[in-house]
Image (spheres, rainbow, N blue to C red):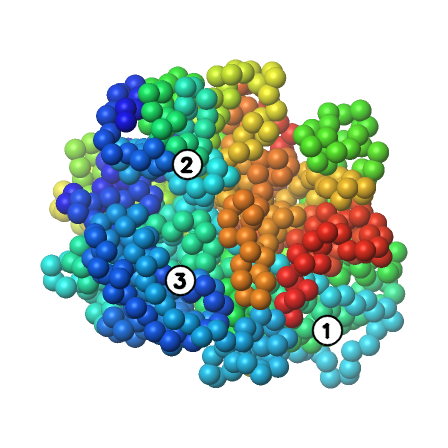
Amino acid sequence: MRFDVNAQVRDLPDVPPWESLLSVLRDRLGLYGAKNACEQGECGSCTVLLEGAPVCACLVPAARAAEREVVTIEGLDDDVLATSVREAIRRCGGVQCGFCTPGFVVSATATLRRDPCLAKTDLPEALSGNLCRCTGYRKILQAVEDVARPGEGVGGSDER
Amino acid sequence: MSADPIAREAPATGRPWGGGAIGDSPARPDGDLKVRGRFAFSSDLHVDGMLWGATVRSPHPHARVLGIDAATAAAMPGVHAVLTAADVPGANSFGLIVADQPVLAAEVVRFEGEAVAIVAAESLEAARRAAEAVVVAYEPLSVVHRVVDALAGEVTVHPAGNVVRDIRIRRGTEDGLTAPVVVRGEYRVGMQDQAPLGTESGLAVPRPDGGVDLYANTQWIHADRNQLASVLALPPSSIHVQLAGVGGAFGAREDISLQAHLCLLALRTGRPVKMVYSREESFYGHVHRHSGVLRYEHGADRDGRLRYVRCEIELDGGAYASTSSPVVSNTAAFAVGPYACPAVDIRAVVAYTNNPPCGAMRGFGAVQAAVGHEAQMDRLARELGMDPLELRLLNVLGDGDLMPTGQPVPGVVPARALLEELRSMPLPPERVDDRDPLTLPGGAGYVTRGEGVVRGVGYGIGFKAGGMPEGVRDFSTARVRVRRHADGVVAEVATAAAEVGQGLVSVVAQIVRTELGVDDVVVLPADTGVGSAGSSSASRQTYMTGGAVKVACDAVRLELLTRAHDRFGHLFPELLEFGHEVTLAAGALLGAEGRAVCTIADLLDGGAIEEERRFDHHPTTSLDEDGQGSPHIQFIFAAHRAVADVDVETGLSRLVELAVVQDVGRAINPLAVEGQMEGGTAQGIGLALMEEIQVREGRVLNPSFTDYLIPTTLDVPPMRLKILEIPDEAAPYGIKGAGEPATISSTPAVVAALREASGRDLARVPVRPWDLIPDLSELASPPGAGSHDNLHEGA
C-alpha cells in the first residue's frame, strides 16, 4: 500500500487493509506524535489530517488512507498556523502531561484554517472531540482564541 | 539495539527554556517537545529486537484457579515465553502498604481482570493471540460485591477476613451527643477512575549482569524498584528504573501495574519487552477511587453553630489493600470538613470485596468526605432557614481550632478567607430566555427552549492533608551539580521525582535559578540513580522535592562561598560572614551593597560542585484508639462556587461558571497552580455529573471512554480563579500542596448548585438526569434507572 504522509510517499508492503492508520503511523512509520489513548475515536489523541480534514487515525482503516494525503503533528512542524497554535498553548499553560496536546494542536489548526477568526465556530463544540484530563480545557480554549483574535481580552469569560 | 530508548526525550543542552525564578511562570522545559508531538511517552519507546508483552486476565470476579494450560500458546509462532505464578522467582506479591496482591494469581482470582499469565511474542498481535490461547480452568466462587456482605463475613476474600481497616475518631463525646437542631443524611459516592490519557506502558531491558533496566510511566520509581526487588529476587541495585514520559497519573500509577510483568518477561527471554495497555485493560490494570456510603448526623444550636457530628463511613476497598488504609483514615479525619466542632464521633471502615481494587486518586479519601459534609451543611442551612454560605462562615475552622484528631490546624487558617473571597466575586449575568440554544442544558441536542430551566448557585469547601500521614517517615532527595561549560555555568538537578504532567520540572528549575543565580538549569530524567523522592502524590512534590532541591542548593552555595572566601576574603570581609550579605544572582557572587565579587564561573575553575541532600518534613504521629494524634504535616484548602442551569423537565444540566479559590501558601509557578485548580475542578465536575465505573456483581460494565464519560470542552464552564498565598511557616518557601484541593470542593459545589436549582435531595454522586426531575421517584422507575445504580447494590 502506498501512503502520502507528511508530503512523503511511503510504500508499505503487507499492510492488512483493516489495520488502523494509527498503527501504520506509529508502528510502521515510527511517527509517534499521534497518540493512542482509547482506540474508539472518543479521545482525539490520535487526530491527524486526512485530505486536510481532522480524523481519528484509530478509526481509519489503512485502505481508506492509502493514496490520500495524511498530515500528522510531525508534518505541521513548519506550518505557520500550527506554530501559532503551539506557541499559544505553551504560553497559556495549556500543556501539562502533554498526551492530548498533539491532537489538540491538529484539531485547533484545522478549525482555524476553516474559520481563522472563529466567526462561524463555537470553539468548545469544535474541540469537544479531544479529551484532556489535566488542564480542564480553559487554557487550551484561551490559547486558540488568542490565535483567532489576538489582543482581544484573552480567555473569554474566564477571569482571575 | 539503539543506545538509549528515551534519548530523544532529553532536552537539548544550552538554554532550552529561558529564565524564570520563583513566582514566575516560565514556559515548561518539556513544553516544546510536547506541543510538537516529539515528547517520548512510555508508549512511544522502541528498541530494535524488542518483544511485545500481553496479559491473560481473569474473566471471573472470584474463582479458584484449577489449572493453566499454556502449551498451545507457547507453541504459537513468534511466542517466546508464557509465564504463570510458578515462574515468579521471588515473592509472588506486591502492594504499597501490605503486599497482598499476587503478581500473577496462583490459586485464587479475586477480581475480574486480575492478571493470571503473561506472554511475550515478536509482535503485539502475536502476543495478544497467544494470550487468548492460554487456557485457564476456573471454579467460580461466591462473589462478595457489597460492603455489607463483606462485613458480614460469610465469604472471605482473604483468609484473614474482609476488614482492611476500621478506624474510630472520637473527641468531646463524654457528655453525649445532643443538640436542639439535628439533621441526618446518607450519601453515596460512585467509583471514579483517574483516566489519565496515557495508559500503563513501559519497556524492560535485560542487563548483561543479570539485572534489568525498566522504563515506565509511574508515580514513584523507588517504590516500584523495591517491590520489583522482592518479586524478582534481585538486590535493588540490580534494578534500574527510569521514568518514561508519563501521560497523567492522578493516583492511578502509585501502585505497580505492568512493571513486574515486564521485568519477568525480559529476564526470562533475554530480550527487551514492551507493553502498552489498551484503554479497556487500563480500567482493569489500576486501582480506582473508592465508592462509599457516608451516614451523617449533625447537631447544631438554633443559631447554626455546630454542637456535634456523628458519622459512619463504609468504603469498598475491592480485592486488594493498595492504599485503602490511609484512604479511609483520610475520609475519617476530614469527615467533618473544615469546621470547628466540639464533639465528633466518626467511624470509618474499608472492606475487601471482589470488586476492582481501589486506592489512590487525587483527593485521597477527602473527596468522598466532602460530598457528605457539604451536603450536610446545606441540609442544616435549609433546616435553619440560613444562607448556606453564612452557615459555613459561622462554623469554619479558625486559627488554633482543632481537628477531630485533636491536632491543631497550625498558623493562619485560610478557610474563612476562601469563603469571603467567593462571596466577593460577582455572579455571572442572569439567564436570558432568547439566548443561543447552545448555552442551554442539552446544548446542540436542542432539547429545550429554556422554559423548564432553573438556575442554582452552590458552595463547597474542602481540605485535606499535604504529604504522607500517620507517622510515615517520608523524605525526598536531590543532587545539584554546578559546572562550567562553553557558555558559562550550568546547574544540573537530579531527583527521582516523577513529572507526571503537573510541572515539577519547571518548579525545580525555578528553585535552582533563585537559589544559585544560575539561569541555565537542566533537570535530568528521573531515575533510581539518586535517592528516593517519594511519590508524586498527596500534593507533596513541590514541598518535598522542592525542599530537597533547596537544601542541596544551600550546600552548593556554601561551597561557592567557601571558595570565594578563600580567594577574595581579604578584599571582601563580608564573605567571612557566610550568607549574610552575600547573594548569588545573574551568574555572579555579590557582596555587601551588591558589589560584584566574582562570577560563579570563576569559582568553578577549581572543579564542579556537586551536593546531594535529603529533605525530611517535620515528624507526625500515628493515631491512638480514639483516633487522636498529630497525623498530618499540613492542611490544604480550596473552595468553590458553582452556578448551574438545570432543565427540570429533562433532567439535563449545564454549568454556567465555577469560581475557585485556593490557598497554596506560596505560588512557585502561578500558571501551574492555575492549571492544578482548573484541572482539579474539572475532575470534580466529572464526579459530580458523569464519572462512575459501573460494577455489577464484581463485573465492570463500562471499561471504555465510550461508556465511562469524562468531561469535555462542553462540560467545563468558564472559571474565575483566585490564588491565596498564606504561608506555612514550617514549609520550604511557605509552600502548601496545590495538586488536590480543587478536586475536593468542586464536586459538592456543583451538586449544591444542582440541588438548589432542582429542589431534589441529590444524595449520591454522580448525579444522573433522572435524579434532577421532580417527583419521578414516585412514578415507575425510568428505564434503566434502578439497574444503573451500582451503589444501590454496593453496601
The image quadrant that residue B221 belongs to is bottom left
Query: Going 39% across and 32% down the picture, which residue do you hit?
Result: A61
Q: CA distance from mark 1 to mark 2?
A: 51 Å
Q: Which residue is mark 3?
A: B57
Name the quarter where the C terminus of chain B is drawn.
Answer: bottom right
Mark 1 vs mark 2, foreground winner is 2
Q: Chain of mark 1?
A: B
Q: Which residue is mark 1?
A: B310
Name the quarter where the N terminus of chain B is drawn.
Answer: top left
In the rendered image, residues at marks 1 and 3 fall on the same chain: yes
Q: Element at badge 3?
A: strand
Q: Amino acid at mark 3?
A: Arg
Query: Going 38% across and 71% down the picture, which residue do you hit?
Result: B137
Mark 1 vs mark 3, foreground winner is 3
Q: Chain of mark 3?
A: B
Q: Are marks 2 and 3 in contact (CB under 8 Å)?
A: no
Give residue A58's mark.
Answer: 2
Q: Are marks 1 and 2 in contact (CB under 8 Å)?
A: no
Q: Element at badge 2?
A: helix
